[in-house]
Image: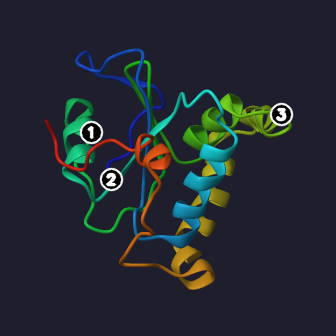
């Protein structure tokens, strides 16, 4: 994924949408999505895998083409794109307490935050494994995910 300035804006995005794009075969990433869902009772955040056509369509207005092997956690919020640690911290800010207080780490310089992020991202398959198949979601859980194909 190309590197973008945090908060890169695309005019075609809808400001009310908050979407997390994640590596759909990564156990750590899938676990993180379930963690977020459990701590977002207002269901403000929706999700789609970076490997999906929907992700490609959402990223295109930002000038980003998804990699074949995703290496970043992405947040689209208010028409802006955030990646890596900035995306993770902005999501944390939306969760129930005490998780929202993790946003305080935003004061740590981004290169240092992203260094830690990249170490975890580089080792996520080795440490947490990966799955080619997803569990069958309940209707409530399915409603939190965008359709995989682009409109």
Q: Mark 2 points at which residue?
A: 1
- Residue toward you, 76 or 16: 16
- Looking at the image, is mark 3 or mark 2 nearer the viewer? 3
Give residue 144's position: percent from left, percent from top.
45, 41
Left or right: where 144 falls relative to 102: left
Q: Mark 3 points at which residue?
A: 97
* Label 2 secondary element: loop
Query: Local crowd at mark 3 within 10 Å, few (<14), some, or many (≥20)?
Result: few
Query: Local crowd at mark 1 within 10 Å, few (<14), some, or many (≥20)?
Result: many
Q: Name the residue under label 1.
A: 59
Give residue 8's position: percent from left, percent from top.
38, 26
* Contact check, label 2 and label 1, Cβ < 8 Å: yes
* Label 3 secondary element: loop
* Contact check, label 3 and label 1, Cβ < 8 Å: no
The residue lying at 41 percent from left, 40 percent from top is 143
* Contact check, label 3 and label 2, Cβ < 8 Å: no
């Amino acid at each position: 994924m190309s590197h973008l300035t945090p908060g890169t804006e695309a005019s075609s995005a809808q400001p009310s949408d908050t979407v997390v794009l994640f590596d759909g075969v990564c156990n750590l990433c899938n676990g993180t999505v379930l963690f977020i869902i459990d701590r977002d009772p207002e269901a403000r955040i929706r999700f789609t895998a970076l490997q999906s056509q929907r992700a490609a369509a959402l990223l295109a207005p930002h000038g980003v083409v998804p990699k074949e092997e995703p290496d970043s956690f992405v947040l689209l919020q208010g028409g802006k794109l955030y990646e890596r640690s900035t995306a993770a911290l902005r999501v944390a800010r939306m969760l129930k307490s005490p998780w929202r207080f993790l946003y305080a780490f935003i004061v740590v310089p981004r290169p240092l935050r992203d260094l830690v992020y990249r170490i975890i991202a580089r080792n996520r398959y080795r440490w947490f494994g990966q799955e080619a198949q997803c569990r069958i979601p309940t209707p409530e859980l399915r409603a939190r995910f965008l359709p995989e194909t682009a409109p």
